[in-house]
Amino acid sequence: MDSIQDRINYLKNLILHHQHQYYIMDSPEISDIEYDQLMKELHQLEMNYPHFLTSDSPTQRIGGFALSSAFKKVHYNIPMLSLDYVNNKKSYMEFHMRLHEKLKKDKDITFCCDLKVDGLAVNLLYINGSLSQASTRGDGKIGEDITSNIRTISVIPQRLIGHDIPDYLEVRGEVFMPHEGFKKLNKQAFRDGCKIFANPRNAAAGSLRHRDPFITATRPITFVAYGLGLFTEGILPRSHIECLQYLKTCGLPVSDYLCLCHNSKEVLDFYHYIEANRSLLGFDIDGIVIKVDNLDLQVKLSSTSRAPRWAVAFKFPAQEKITRVCDVEFQISRTGTLTPVAKLEPILISGVMVSSATLHNFSEINRLGLKIGNHVIVRRAGDVIPKIMSVVQSSSYLDMNTREITLPMNCPICNSRIQKLQEEVVARCTGGLICAAQIVGALKHFVSRKALNVKGIGEKLLAQLVKNEYVKNPADLFTLTLHQLINLEHIHLKSAQNILDTLNDSKYTTFARFLYALGIPKVGEATARNLSDYFGTIDRIMNASLVTLMKVDGVGRVGAHNIKNFFNEKNNIEIISILIENVGIYWK
Ligand code: I6G
């Protein structure tokens, strides 16, 4: 077995490698959670075995930044610190009590709370009101000069507005990419065959530290100021909130979500409010930041070499966790499409036990390169259905006994054949008329105005009929009895009789309506009419080749396959023959 020191050295080297990939190459090989887990393990080992802790350990760096030789270095007189963080109420209350003890204050302390935007900290230097240099946080003492790139961000003023602007003013804030821009950027990158960014923070980092500012200019990044660095006299704010209000008057963007809280209860209320509404913000945050508002008190509390003692980040529970895919099942939607669903080893994500995640369709499985048995990163954000983000690449997770995911040949619900055409992303169950998963949708379509036009039968009634097992396919509608109908909720004798009468009337229809009513995918009303005109009888359509079907106006390759597969399914043929021969549906 490796010694503790070997493991520490291994982790240090591995973390340095991943830092290089992330910060210098802009090409991360592992996800943020995997990286955090390596850091956590190293941190834990160094805490348990402090004699192995060295000053060059990645855990001792602010923000864990590596510096690239591509950018000029910038030295900070006032370091760009990190923030300590808490991730539960108990730890937050400890921070709160610590402040009261240190300040020997029984009375309430005012806090200025803000969002912890998931971006990159930067320093903007204004000399005589003009933007003269911009730099990354780097290791906190030395950052990288990214002035040309920062000048492309339109919300950052090149000149500050107003009077009494200090000759020398450092503004600190966060560069980030809102969701909308991120989605557009990745969509375009996909079309162009370029690199897809893993998340908005990665995209913002890649954009901000791009060697070509013309590329940065095309990227949807923005900025919000969160505080001041070094400044010469001119302004004399007494509180943090006044600093931010002042920056706003100078033309700099500051947070729209600042909140002054006067005690721990108000801070916790703000935390819960933001957590509940974070999905509406339009950009990623990973918590809130709580700062002592009074600047004199900040000075009294001072900072460590890493972080201010007067502030803390209160992080939200992680929305992403690692777990294992035990199996993949296929669900049939109301329209017959197959959705692969990953069955997971249950895992608690932001307070909810997650045991399955959608995989959307087969190309998603291919995109992820997913196999049963893989460890994956699962994301659960707000009320959105849990989603698999990626397969874990880290060698710390050994995936034994993995298995390819294969499309079933037959529908798990009705056993009809599954169709997957090359040109379609989705696979479909071909048992449209009998499949229990599709039946309410199929019946709704069957009775709709442009199909058999049975008035008085809506979705709610159909759902009741299916639930009571009175109806399993469209032919069963015509065997309904008055007794069955009045047994249902909200159906009185008169409306029950009306339903039976209209069902009876609907038996006389047109061939085109009947074809349309079958609900064959891609056979809409107009195509059904064309098929009816071209073939005239159902037997001729059933026996037509793909080539002949494609001669009909509106029938392409996919449509022709759908028709062929529909009529190849014996369950469908059986229902059609019952409808025509037993029920007595007819047309002239
Ligand atoms: O990285 C940060 C993000 C947001 C911060 C920060 C912040 O306030 C909203 N505030 C400070 C004081 C520091 N980092 C050091």
Image (spheres, rainbow, N blue to C red):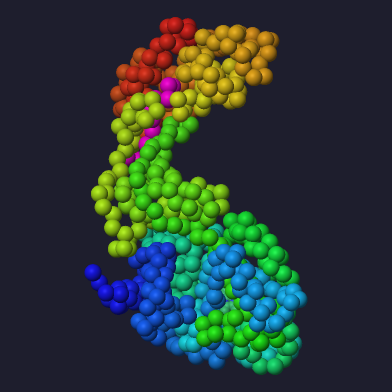
Q: Residue furthest left?
A: 1
Q: Mainly helix, strand or loop, the magenta region? A: loop
Give residue 366's position: percent from left, percent from top: 33, 49
Give residue 546's position: percent from left, percent from top: 31, 27
Q: Would you say 88 lies left or right of 19 here?
A: right
Whether residue 344 is situated above or below residue 244 in the rendered picture: above
Which of the pair 273/245 is nearer the observer?
A: 273
Give residue 571's position: percent from left, percent from top: 37, 19
- Taking the magenta stretch, the answer to whether it contains residue 162 is no
Q: Which residues are magenta?
A: 422-435
**Residue 579: quarter of image:** top left
Whether residue 470 is situated above or below residue 421 in the rendered picture: above
Q: Residue at x 56, y 24 (%)?
A: 463
Q: Residue at x 61, y 14 (%)?
A: 487
In the rendered image, which quarter contains the N terminus? Answer: bottom left
Q: Residue at x 38, y 25 (%)?
A: 414
**Residue 48: quarter of image:** bottom left
Q: Residue at x 44, y 87 (%)?
A: 72
Which of the pair 363/408 is nearer the observer?
A: 408
> Which corner quadrant of the figure contains ligand 1?
bottom right
Which of the pair 29/261 is nearer the observer?
A: 261
Residue 253 visible in image: no
Which of the pair 567/138 is nearer the observer?
A: 138
Whether residue 525 is situated above or below residue 402 in the rendered picture: above
Give residue 380's position: percent from left, percent from top: 50, 53
Whether residue 476 is situated above or below residue 241 in the rendered picture: above
Mark count: 0
Residue 439 visible in image: yes
- Taking the magenta stretch, the answer to whether it contains residue 423 is yes
